[in-house]
Amino acid sequence: MPKRLLRPSSVRAAPEGTTVEDRDTGAGASEVGASSASPGPSGPGTAGWQQRRPTEPRSADGQAGDATHHQKGKPKKRRKRRRGRKVFARDEAHPQGSRSPTPSQAAAPALEPKQPTALAISPAAPTPRPEQGARRSPVHELPVFAALDLGTNNCRLLVAVPTRHGQFRVIDAFSRIVRLGEGLTANGRLGQPAMDRAVEALKICGDKLRSRKIRKARLIATEACRSAENGVEFLERVEREAGLKLEIIDRQTEARLAVSGCGSLVERDTQGVVLFDIGGGSSEIALIDLTGRRSPRLANHIVSWTSLPVGVVSLAERFGGRTVTRDIFTAMVDDVAGRLAAFDGRDRLSHLKASPNFHLLGTSGTVTTLAGVHLDLERYDRRRVDGLWMDRDSVDRMVERLVGWDFQQRCANPCIGADRADLVLAGCAILEAIRAVWPSERLRVADRGLREGILSELMADDGVWRNDGRGR
């Protein structure tokens, strides 16, 4: 069979929208701002990328196969011309004049099959000869960092390089709704179909990571793996089959990472912020007081935090997500309000609630969905949603609008869709409970979160912004 052609090194990674099945941070944005993050406890994945090759060698496109069966007796290269460009293909046992693969058939080379072994980074792929007139890569390549977040509902990956101080540019991304926590509330265990979906998504992430020279990465798992009886057992399977070693982070770390990822959305004149991240299985809330001398690390200003063991998936499974009457919605709000009443640090920002420089900052699919509906978008657009300000009346109208829709109407909305239609009202209920405790005239929407926090921490710890912000 013919060798696959290597992609020219001058070609950048495909835009996120071409590979992502769920909307995702990084699409349409050349740079992502992130504040310098506070240092966290050391542990697996914090100092480098701990990864193992999967037991069965996999190529860059996710297919298993032998990449070395043509090593012996390599035929002489011959030059072909295709669309005015020089490409090289090896003579194989094909009739003379057979056509070379089309561009859509070209793919990255398969990984070398080896026995599973611990490694910090996979061997770099062979570099193809540059095209005529193509730009050569800079002598000093920017370091590449990666962050993976396996949550209760989503599996998400970001790969980025540092740019200006406190900022980075996303060069590759992946996001897929896997619903790992499906059935967890009732059974206490991760279900087989849910684990299968997550492993398949993680295999794609593993292939993406092994195709690049990663300086540092952190791969985390959150509430679903934290609370499931078989969470650790599942991550052992992930290591065997996808070649990725994930760490289960605690709730405090999750809250800190969410703050770190949203730092650039907190303006200089801000005095107080309640930042919340409504997840699939848990919801993290951090109270941030900025009235004193401001540190460049936003997480240093957290004065109180909590993690509620309830998210959109767990709440929807308990109360129902498809058919949600107003009474059911009120019951969901009351359930979350009862949990917030037990939060001892809830009043740590009471002296700032009346200030015009106090606001809420939400990072989750719930608030980005509300923003998309508010903007009446025909298709979700991160560039218009991330950083959007919504006033109290606008949020009230959007929640009321969604509560009034039936399941089919929610499915039909392009910013909700079938994947989120049974979860969005549970998210709205959590949001309403938060707004009742911390009423604010303004809510800022963040389409960013844990992965951006991981990347900002990794880059800050690596010192890539110490000099001129261009990286090493």
Image (cartoon, rainbow, N blue to C red):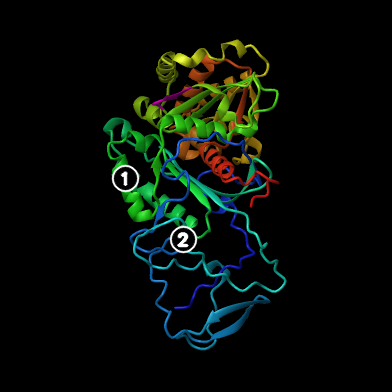
Residue at 49%, 68% (x, y): give it.
109
Please name the amino acid that badge 1 sits on.
Phe
Q: Residues within 10 Å of mark 2 (few under 14, many from 20)?
A: some
Q: Is residue 382 left or right of residue 92?
A: right
Image spot of residue 375 (x, y percent): 64, 32
Residue 35 higher or lower than 140, as above or below: above
Q: Quadrant of residue 373?
A: top right
Viewer can see residue 288: yes
Q: Quadrant of residue 456?
A: top right
Numbered badge on residue 122? 2
Magenta span includes 306: yes
Magenta span includes 78: no
Image spot of residue 172 (x, y percent): 56, 52
Q: Sequence-wise, which precedes: disc 2 or disc 1?
A: 2
> Which stretch did the figure color magenta?
305-310
Residue for badge 1: 234
Query: Distance between the Cα atoms at labels 2 and 1?
Result: 24 Å
Q: Main secondary structure of the magenta part?
A: strand
